Image (spheres, rainbow, N blue to C red):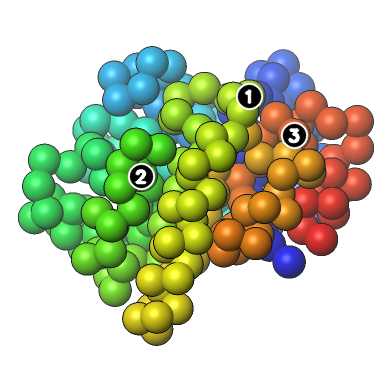
Amino acid sequence: MVEVSVSILSVKNENAIQTLYNLETAGIDYFHIDVMDGQFVENDTTNTMLEYCEYLNSISNLPLDVHLMVKDVKDNIDKFLAFEPNTITFHLESAKDKEQVMEWIKYIKENNAKVGISIKPNTKIEEIYEYLPFIHVVLVMTVEPGKGGQPLIPATLEKIRQLSKYIKENNIEVDIEADGGIYVENVEELKNAGANIVVSGTAIVKSDNFSQTVKKLKQ
């Protein structure tokens, strides 16, 4: 069984509060907050995600899983710390060097959140290995970050398999989260590869029955 983090990227603003409430009661484990700045990726969702986090703070007790697809990581960590997130994940590709990666890890931990590092589909999985002892989650992007509704890139499954093998062999405790193009039809492949958290947006938000879809993803 996997945990399900629902991406709220495709939640429509006009009925956001009701939709967020319905998602929570459907049995999800986390709300996945996709923060984009229009620079690291094409779209800019920062203000919408800040607004949705405010809603969630008033209606939900579920943990927030904040995914920063941004150039200015420190500034965005500060913006979203106000909502006491469970996890803040930044992109390895946003850092100029290893020292900066370690600074961000330390800063997030000092502010009582778990740390995740995400990698794009073209980044080699080996680049994350040295940081594994210091973080809680590796978020493997299974599509190019920036837009919802893309098909999963099959080659990313091999990266998850490699990562899972390395974690087991080195006895490291870290979650593997997969994000992008995840549906009921392909979730089994991700579980078999080693992912224990899946991010799903369109598949849940655009389904006729949130609870049923979440249940099928978890099984």
Q: Which residue is mark 3?
A: 203
Which image quarter is the C terminus in?
Answer: bottom right
The location of residue 126, given as percent across then percent down, is 28, 57
Image quadrant assignment for residue 41:
top left
Residue at 90% across / 47% down in the picture?
212
Q: Nearer the viewer, residue 212 or 154?
A: 154
Instruction: Tell me the kind of residue under disc 3.
Output: Ala
Say how many tags the image has: 3
Q: Nearer the viewer, residue 158 or 105?
A: 158
Marks 2/3: CA distance? 22 Å
Marks 3/1: CA distance? 8 Å
Instruction: Classify residue 197 as left or right of residue 12.
Output: left
Residue 101: mark:
none
Instruction: Tell me the kind of residue under disc 2.
Output: Ile
Question: How packed is label 1: few (under 14 Cα within 10 Å), some, or many (20 or more)?
Answer: some
Q: Nearer the viewer, residue 87 or 165?
A: 165
SS under mark 2? strand
SS under mark 1? loop
Residue 149: mark:
1
**Which of pointers 1 and 2 lies earlier in the amino acid sequence?**
2
The location of residue 131, given as percent across then percent down, is 25, 64
SS under mark 3? helix
**Which of pointers 2 and 3 lies earlier in the amino acid sequence?**
2
Residue 119: mark:
2
Q: Is residue 210 visible?
A: yes
Residue at 30% across / 25% down in the picture?
40
Instruction: Tell me the kind of residue under disc 1.
Output: Gly
Q: Is residue 136 above or below residue 83?
A: below
Marks 1/2: CA distance? 19 Å
